[in-house]
Amino acid sequence: SQTIHQWPATLVQPVGSPLSLECTVEGTSNPNLYWYRQAAGRGLQLLFYSVGIGQISSEVPQNLSASRPQDRQFILSSKKLLLSDSGFYLCAWTQGQNEQFFGPGTRLTVL
Amino acid sequence: AQTVTQSQPEMSVQEAETVTLSCTYDTSESNYYLFWYKQPPSRQMILVIRQEAYKQQNATENRFSVNFQKAAKSFSLKISDSQLGDTAMYFCAFMTLFTGNQFYFGTGTSLTVIP
């Protein structure tokens, strides 16, 4: 069966520090991968999606970047965090005409 | 542009009663998929139910069913015999078959089941 992992689960970082969130998927190959951000009590904002290794599409201009160095690995990064980067980050995958499966999320607090 | 609208930010229902959550969407596509996701306090996103646009029959999963009105672009979720564990945020989502199979989510409805 397929599983999706995200780490860390919780992160507190100072403004101006770098960020690296990792997402890995097991039990499938060539998935579409997604990064979402969810502000408190709000909906999901799509940040990036990827249809293959090295292929990244960005939905909104921002302080973040994404990379897909391996088929089942998706990384969200920032060189310098802003206060506005605080939120709950969700990684998801899908394949074919199926629903998205979500990871457990990372709660990021920028102080 | 693809949009999903959930016009009810918050709802409540008595335990064992029935509640309906509304969702409308806008698309020019003819082939797409619709979903309802549940996000309990743990914040894990859980699929509740899915509907293929080409199917006229409404999807049903145990106590959960949808009313899919394609012409009206409406996709409501009915929860029967509400249980305390149904308390969660519910998101309506829409998927196109464009590159990346992009999903579009509504802003969510916070449902509280009252004992």
Image: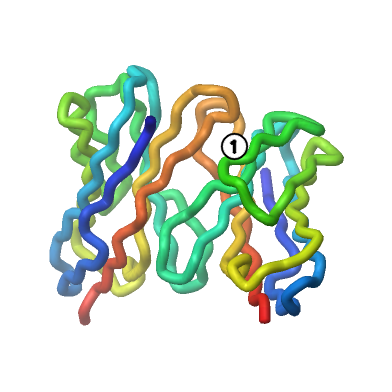
Q: Position of residue A10 (x, y in %)?
A: 69, 74
**Could you tell me which residue is drawn at 73 percent across and 41 percent down?**
A27
**Could you tell me which residue is drawn at 29 percent across and 32 percent down?**
B26
Does A47 appear above or below B99? Answer: below
Left or right, A58 with respect to A66, comes to left
**In the depicted view, which residue is nearer to us: A65 or B84?**
A65
How packed is label 1: few (under 14 Cα within 10 Å), some, or many (20 or more)?
A: many
Q: Quadrant of residue A55?
A: top right
Left or right, A107 with respect to A24, comes to left
**Could you tell me which residue is drawn at 15 percent across and 73 percent down?**
B14
Residue at the farthest right position: A69
Q: Quadrant of residue B112?
A: bottom left
Q: Helix or strand or loop: what does disc 1 sit on? A: strand
**In the depicted view, which residue is nearer to us: B104 or B14?**
B104
Q: Position of residue B57 (x, y in %)?
A: 23, 27
Q: Mark 1 highlights which residue?
A: A94
**In the depicted view, which residue is nearer to us: B59 or B62?**
B59
**In the depicted view, which residue is nearer to us: B94 or B27?**
B27
Q: Position of residue B74 (x, y in %)?
A: 21, 37
**Could you tell me which residue is drawn at 62 percent across and 56 percent down?**
A103
Which quarter of the figure is the N terminus of chain B placed in?
top left
Q: Quadrant of residue B13?
A: bottom left
- Which subunit holds the residue at mark 1? A
Which quarter of the figure is the C terminus of chain B placed in?
bottom left
What amino acid type is highlighted by mark number 1? Answer: Thr
